Image: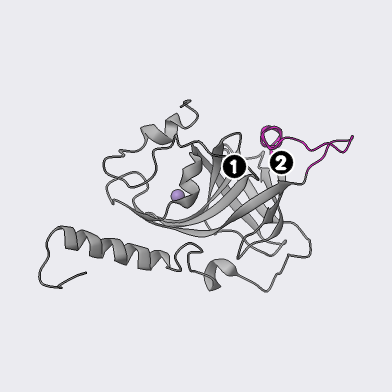
Amino acid sequence: MTDATKEYQEKRDFRKTDEPAGGAGGGSGAPIWVIQEHDASNRHFDLRIEVDGVLKSWAVPKGPSTDPAEKRLALPTEDHPLEYADFEGTIPEDEYGGGAVIVWDRGTYTNLKEDEDGEPVPVGAQLDDGHLTLRLEEGEKLAGGFALTRLQRRHEDAWLLVKMDDDEADARRNPVSTERESVKTGRTVDEVAADSAGETAGEDGDAGDGGA
Ligand code: MN
């Protein structure tokens, strides 16, 4: 494989974490997006969108909002392999990003930005320009247009994630607090952590729960 996700791989010990090492390829069909809830040292959400064979990634401390008036800080993190979109589980506490992860929502997207000739602007070029607009499809919690805009004024590379004001905008919803379950397994991030703790206890031969 290429070293498109070299930084991702260097941060992790795949003998210790169940996260995917990458290299499975894929990426045919409509490009995907995923938002994972991640109970690391600071609980946050990770937004990832497929661009040019990798998942471009941002940590969104407060998670996405369906209210166009809410701007959510989004801090870029290293590119992740495409297979990461399916990852749910618990990263060991002493490993990078230690803590439980769920697939909070996911789907495919369409590119909303066109040039003067009505041709779509490649998403990679939109990223370089510091402003991209996407329409999320097939999500269970999120839908419609979202914009990501790079902030100019900060020392660090920081972006804002904002719901576009379209038919799917809804200021009354707050899915990051009212819709906590994984769209993959129906578990909350706390339930994933508890399940993993149980498995570890089982492996260690911890006493007499007679486990399955
Ligand atoms: Mn994270």
Magenta highlight on residue 128: yes
Residue at image position (30%, 66%) is 194
What is the crowding at mark 1: few (fewer than 14 residues within 10 Å), some, or many (at least 20)?
many
Q: How many marks?
A: 2
Badge 1 marks a residue whose secondary structure is strand
Q: Amino acid at mark 2?
A: His
What is the crowding at mark 2: few (fewer than 14 residues within 10 Å), some, or many (at least 20)?
some
The segment highlighted magenta reads: 113-131
**Structure colour scheme:** one colour
Cα gap from disc 2 to disc 1, whole angstroms:
16 Å
Q: Nearer the viewer, residue 135 or 69?
A: 135
Question: Residue 80: image x %, image y %?
Answer: 48, 40
Does 197 sit above or below residue 161? below
Does 40 sit above or below residue 10? below
Report whether residue 63 is seen.
yes
Choose the circle earlier in sequence order: 2 or 1: 1
Give the farthest residue toward the top. Answer: 2
Residue at image position (64%, 59%) is 138
Q: Quadrant of the C terminus?
A: bottom left
Which labelled disc corresponds to residue 50? 1
- Asked if residue 104 lies left or right of residue 193, the reply is right
Question: Residue 160: image x %, image y %?
Answer: 64, 49
Question: Residue 136: image x %, image y %?
Answer: 68, 54
Q: Are marks 2 and 1 in contact (CB under 8 Å)?
A: no
Residue at image position (67%, 32%) is 128
Residue at image position (54%, 73%) is 178
Question: Residue 184: image x %, image y %?
Answer: 48, 62
| Residue at mark 2 | 131
